[in-house]
């Protein structure tokens, strides 16, 4: 393995496949959205998206190299042909013979009349582009011959449904410039975590290449250390970027032998899978973005689910930490846990609807949380049916989609401002989803009749996460969620020690009066420690191999400590005198 010359640079070139002029994969829409109203495009100003179609997450792209499997532009007919137009594309710096144009193309069936593809340099006069039509249903990659698109600073593209009943989708639109004298090419990158812990970890990226040895190449990266095979002396090999901080996207740049390639590599998270029983008291400061924690993953786009102070309380239930809040549309977050395939899996949490501002039409039905598979997919769903500005109903459903028909709803109307305890379970044997809402006896809830039940028409093969979802501004009220517990034995619900995942975990003395807090565990290994005050502000962050933590600089009052040891986490409250 030869080390490649590494220069850390800030790249301003457009990304991917040589010099990229346009790259659009339509992001990950949280709901079907009109093209003109959608905001999560990859391409920004001066690129403008318009049209009468919509951006959707259904029928995600697949089956071709580079399929992004996220959102796509849907073109159907509502009596008139729908279209997608992309304006503001600048190809003026490139030779038409070197301009490559590809896109993913989906048709519901073998269409009787194909979609129309056109370009314009003035937005008024349009020229048809010939392309290889779909001969089978599903996704295919369309490659437009070089020399088709002109050099223009005001280029527009238009994809038009022909006005028939045929349905089409477009994804992964790429316009890029490649020098025909360049034989060197970068392949599809792969990433792998170097280690997975509750701390901030690093990952590595491997980028295959072909066509090396044609000259001297310099390979640089915006982050990490460049290693692997040297294309200056190796014809086919792998460039490796080591030590990239998780959550960081990078871009590599390869120059040499008439080639100028830039390739973006999306960020990789290295977050562990949480074991059961799991306890989340949300020890995060107000405004903290939940998806940036090492416990939760963002699975969509938009505004974040954020920390809020103080947390919720409920009679008879041990509580600690703060809470999170969300409302309207935005990012969804999932907490992954060890995949469950048998028995009964439970989740419990406190919930408070704090405002219905923005909801103008009642009733407003939406789902806001539930179980997922190990690969995020909304399955067992929890619903809110906001019936007025001050009241709502709770529902569940084990079937997708749930509307229509409406999911089973509790007949009791809850008030905005009420703190509600929800316990939900799924039984793999009976395929029944149950929910207990404010059960009268917390210790024996599982032996009592549930408030709601729903039987899955198709049994779940596995469950591996719990999600929180922001649907839309007109349906999702402002909510606070707290005290999430996930467990597979009903007796764990009130046994708080079961949620201390570190074996033998305890802290002492409590209260602390001499500035020394001691942490004891069965293995007494290396620990990551975070301490928060009652406002959710982190006041101490340390890593130690000893059992002693110096807290003499903390003011008198109550604090919350989070300890991570051997990929397991425990929480506790303590007081400083």
Image (cartoon, rainbow, N blue to C red):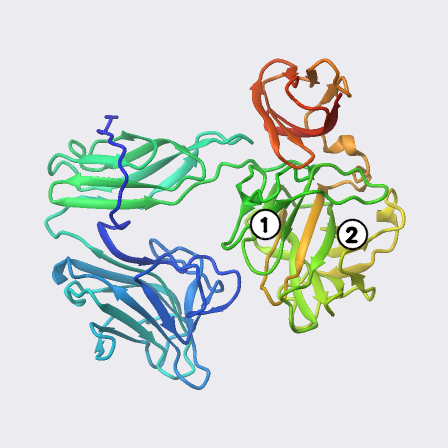
Q: Quadrant of residue 125?
A: bottom left
Q: Quadrant of the C terminus?
A: top right
Residue 225: percent from left, percent from top: 32, 29
Reading the image, the residue beneath label 1 is: 305
Q: Is 224 on the left or on the right of 350, as rendered?
A: left
Task: Using the rendered view, name the quadrant where residue 319 is placed.
Answer: top right
Is residue 403 or residue 92 the one in the foreground? 92
Residue at 17% x, 40% y is: 255
The image quarter containing residue 506 is top right
Q: Residue 189: horizontal and vertical position, in percent?
A: 34, 43
- Confirm whether residue 264 shows in the render: yes
Contact? badges 2 and 1 (CB < 8 Å): no
* Residue 469, image x, y percentages: 60, 55
- Callout 2: few (<14), some (14-19), or many (20+) C-alpha neighbours within 10 Å? some
Q: Which residue is mark 2?
A: 419
Label 1 Cα crowd, 10 Å radius (few <14 / some 14-19 / many 20+): many
Which is more toward the observer, 121 or 467? 121
């Amino acid at each position: 393995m030869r080390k490649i010359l590494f220069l850390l640079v800030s790249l301003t070139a457009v990304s991917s496949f040589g010099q990229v002029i346009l790259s659009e994969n339509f992001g990950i829409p949280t709901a079907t959205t009109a093209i003109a109203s959608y905001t999560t495009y990859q391409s920004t100003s001066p690129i403008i998206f318009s049209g009468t179609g919509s951006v959707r997450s259904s029928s995600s792209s697949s089956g071709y190299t580079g399929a992004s499997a996220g959102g796509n532009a849907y073109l159907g007919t509502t009596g008139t042909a729908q279209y997608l137009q992309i304006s503001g594309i600048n190809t003026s710096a490139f030779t038409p013979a070197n301009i490559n144009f590809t896109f993913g193309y989906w048709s519901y069936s073998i269409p009787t009349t194909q979609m129309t593809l056109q370009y314009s340099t003035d937005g008024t006069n349009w020229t048809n582009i010939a392309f290889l039509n779909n001969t089978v249903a599903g996704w295919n990659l369309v490659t437009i011959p070089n020399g088709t698109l002109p050099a223009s600073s005001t280029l527009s593209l238009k994809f038009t449904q022909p006005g028939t009943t045929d349905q089409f989708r477009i994804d992964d639109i790429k316009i890029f410039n490649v020098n025909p004298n360049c034989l060197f090419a970068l392949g599809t990158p792969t990433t792998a975590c170097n280690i997975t812990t509750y701390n901030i970890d690093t990952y590595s990226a491997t980028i295959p290449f072909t066509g090396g040895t044609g000259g001297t190449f310099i390979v640089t990266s915006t982050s990490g250390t460049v290693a692997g095979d040297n294309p200056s002396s190796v014809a086919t090999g792998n460039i490796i970027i080591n030590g990239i901080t998780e959550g960081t996207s990078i871009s590599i740049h390869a120059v040499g032998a008439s080639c100028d390639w830039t390739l973006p590599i999306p960020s990789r998270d290295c977050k562990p899978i949480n074991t059961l029983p799991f306890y989340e008291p949300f020890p995060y400061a107000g405004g903290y973005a939940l998806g940036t924690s090492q416990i939760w993953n963002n699975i969509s786009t938009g505004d974040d689910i954020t920390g809020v102070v103080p947390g919720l309380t409920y009679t008879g239930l041990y509580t600690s930490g703060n809470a999170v809040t969300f409302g309207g549309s935005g990012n969804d977050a999932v907490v992954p846990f060890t995949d469950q395939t048998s028995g009964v899996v439970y989740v419990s949490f406190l919930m408070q609807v704090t405002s219905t501002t923005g909801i103008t039409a009642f009733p407003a039905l939406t789902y806001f949380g539930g179980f997922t598979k190990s690969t995020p997919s909304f399955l067992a769903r929890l619903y809110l049916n906001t019936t007025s500005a001050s009241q709502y109903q709770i529902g569940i459903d084990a079937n997708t989609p749930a509307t229509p028909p409406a999911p089973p709803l509790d007949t009791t109307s809850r008030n905005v401002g009420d703190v509600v305890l929800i316990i939900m379970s799924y039984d793999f044997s009976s395929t029944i989803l149950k929910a207990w809402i404010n059960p009268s006896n917390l210790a024996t809830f599982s032996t009592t009749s549930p408030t709601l039940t729903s039987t899955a028409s198709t049994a779940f093969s596995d469950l591996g996460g719990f999600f929180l979802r922001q649907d839309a501004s007109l349906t999702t009220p402002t909510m606070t969620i707290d005290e999430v517990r996930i467990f597979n034995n009903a007796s764990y619900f009130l046994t708080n020690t079961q949620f201390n995942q570190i074996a033998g975990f305890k802290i002492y003395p409590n209260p602390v009066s001499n500035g020394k807090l001691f942490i004891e565990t069965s293995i007494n290994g290396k620990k990551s420690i975070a301490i928060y005050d009652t406002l959710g502000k982190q006041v101490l962050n340390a890593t130690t191999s000893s059992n002693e933590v110096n807290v003499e600089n903390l003011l008198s009052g109550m604090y919350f400590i989070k300890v991570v040891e051997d990929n397991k986490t425990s929480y506790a409250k303590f007081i400083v005198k």
